Amino acid sequence: MFVVPSDNLAIPLGGGKGVPFLAPAPQALELLAVPSDGDALLSVDGEVYRLHGTALSSVASQVGAQAAASADGKVIVGIEDKKAIKVTVGAASRVVHHHREGRWELERPYVTPDGRFALVTLRDYENPNLDEFSFLSIDTKGGEPEEIALSKTFAPDVLRVGISNDQVLLRMLAQESDEQGAPVTRDAGLVIFDFRTRKLSPAPEELRAGLASPKAGHLLMPGPTVWGDGRQCSGDETTVLLKDTKWART
């Protein structure tokens, strides 16, 4: 079967109508990782399961919201009550608190392939006109998170691509206002965060990055939101890179 976690849908590959993958439907069903053994890791309302064929087996409980996993699925990082980071390694877990003044919350963890480091986005709501963002860098083996400030107009996109066990590629968006004063974002380019130096640097221009297809070598890069006339509807400007060709926008 072909599983579409975001829609709780299972489609038989031999033909037939799609059916709900889980019943009753969970509030949140997400794909965390596909380890080298080929079994997918799924997060179901904060519980992590391994999908082998059509069978589910429990991996970890109460891992937190928006969980992310290492390549082998052994290290899982999630958000606890929007203000703390929960690190789960096997049957053991610990909660890492970050102390900060003001109105803020944590979102979108990323875990390096080897599970050693995690990067978490911090969104600050203190400014009534513009959300401000920082990164928290965490050593999953212990220690306090370190906050890395971003430019006040920069917002990190959802893209996270591991370059190595020490580096992750991200795309930054610049927050602006249109002629009517409505908030808009534009692509501000790719950057690389280094967990060893705790610094951001521009990605090389020749670097091609995105969500890779398993075999063909194609890449898919979800883009910033594009609004239609009158701002009644919007969509993502997705960029597709076919193998050995130039970028093509859709």
Image (tube, rainbow, N blue to C red):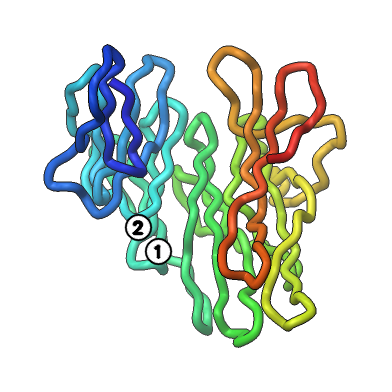
The residue under label 2 is which amino acid type?
Val
Left or right: residue 173 versus residue 72 is right
Could you tell me which secondary element the residue under label 2 belongs to?
A: strand
Q: Which percent across, then down, holds residue 150?
A: 71, 65
Left or right: residue 64 versus residue 146 is left
Left or right: residue 190 versus residue 38 is right
Viewer-proximal residue among 142 and 210: 210
Viewer-proximal residue among 79 and 30: 30
Q: Residue at x 32, y 29 (%)?
A: 3
Q: Which percent across, then down, holds residue 192?
A: 73, 43
Left or right: residue 131 versus residue 207 is left
Q: Nearer the viewer, mark 1 or mark 2?
A: 1
Residue annotated with mark 1: 84
Instruction: Check the image and report above or below for 70 versus 129.
Output: above
Q: Which percent across, then down, holds residue 109?
A: 49, 50
Residue annotated with mark 2: 95
Q: Residue at x 18, y 28 (%)?
A: 57
The residue under label 1 is which amino acid type?
Ala
Q: Residue furthest left?
A: 24
- Say if mark 1 contacts mark 2, CB within 8 Å: yes
Q: Residue at x 78, y 17 (%)?
A: 244
Q: Residue furthest right?
A: 205
